[in-house]
Image (cartoon, grey):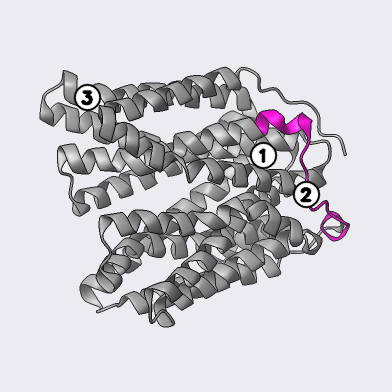
Amino acid sequence: MKKTIAGMKENFFQDRNFSLLLLAGIFIGIASGINVTIFNNYLSDTYHLTAQARGIVEFPRELPGVFIVVVIGLLAALGNVRIAAIGTLAAALGMMGLGLFSPSFGVMLIWMMLFSLGTHILLPMIPVIGMGLSQRGEYGARLGRYGAYNLSATIFGYAVVWLGFKYLHLTYQGAFVIGAIFFVLAAFAFQNMQRKKAEVKKQPKFVFRKEYKLYYVLSVVNGARKQVFLTFAPWVLVQFFHVDPPVFAVLGVVVAFVSILTRTLVGRAIDYKDEKFILTVEASIVIVICLGYAFASKLFAPAVALIITAVCYVIDNSMSVVEMARSTYLRKIALSSEEVAPTLAAGTSFDHIVAMTIPFFGGLLWMKFGYEYVFFAAAAIGLLNLILAQRVFTRALQD
């Protein structure tokens, strides 16, 4: 037992910064698991929102993602680790405000946007820090390992909510405070990371280069594809198969376990194959999933169609892991390592600009022609993604 503990300590200190990144990922995962589990119920029970009002809330919730390139540009002089710490503290303050200081709907929106700002800051910062702590041939494996730890922790967050609300009389206020505490712990983990000299030197605030145009286009296409599934895939299950919240909870757990496996596999595949292979497989799977959503109820009995659609739901929700392939692709083609963070931030902004418009046009398409045509359009996006994937290549990083 003593030898095991000594070995763990040795491994921690030998790779101290990456170990602290994993620890931060665990804390972020727990907090995120708590938030995603309670947020919609919190809105419904506290503010009694209609379905239309809930849809409108998505606009201010996603708005910080559009401006993330500006925010990270303004904070660039602080270095990536400190920016990540600021992101977790903003998320913590937002969760605390949601739980304790939201006397009205308008005030709640402000805290929600602060929380959203914090989590959107982390989107480009986590892969930048993870790749900065990795060698070129292990980018995928290291990011996959972080993702597996983070996702495993979200399951613990789900358990906190389930046990707390079912047996311990936990309230929304208490749950938000618990989540905020875990975000603060993540900030401490980031702050205890030893900063490299590269972190201290001047970083570019904004980067827009023609050399990165394929990455920008991939980000835009990914934003469109992602939002179709986030918005309309659950609605198909609700409207046509009458899936209730407990079943969605079960599907969520299945998605989490599948994603833990796929994050590790995809991470290794990036290193052993390349980003072109991963993005090609993703695009091909997206096309098949879209056709599954569109035709399941047309070609099969209701019970079989439900199973097929549920499988499609699990698979498409597990494919967020492929985002790391776009990050590692950019890291490998970057003209300098200092340009990675602002370029990832730009990609996040482009992603969200598209993501904010897709629900509106997808809704019109659904109402006019039927939900099948939403997924036909998504399949066309998948085909475009497949074509773009064939243009992906990497070269040696030039510092």
- Rendered position, 371 above or below 17: above
Element class at badge 2: loop
The region drawn magenta spans 198-215
- State the mark number for residue 139: 1
**Residue visible at 66% across and 23% down?**
392
Mark 3 or mark 1, which is nearer the start of the sequence? 1
Location of residue 118 (image quadrant): bottom right
Question: What amino acid is at disc 2?
Answer: Phe
Residue 305 visible in the current orientation: yes
Few, some or many residues within 10 Å of mark 2 (<14, 14–19, 20+): some
Q: Calculate the distance from the C-alpha at mark 1 to the C-alpha at mark 3.
A: 38 Å
- State the mark number for residue 206: 2
Q: Is residue 387 magenta?
A: no
What is the total number of numbered labels drawn onto the structure image? 3
Can you give x and y, in whole percent of width and height, for residue 83 in the image?
A: 70, 62
Q: Calculate the distance from the C-alpha at mark 3 to the C-alpha at mark 2.
A: 45 Å
Element class at badge 1: helix
Location of residue 310 (image quadrant): top left
Question: Which residue position is annotated with label 3?
Answer: 296
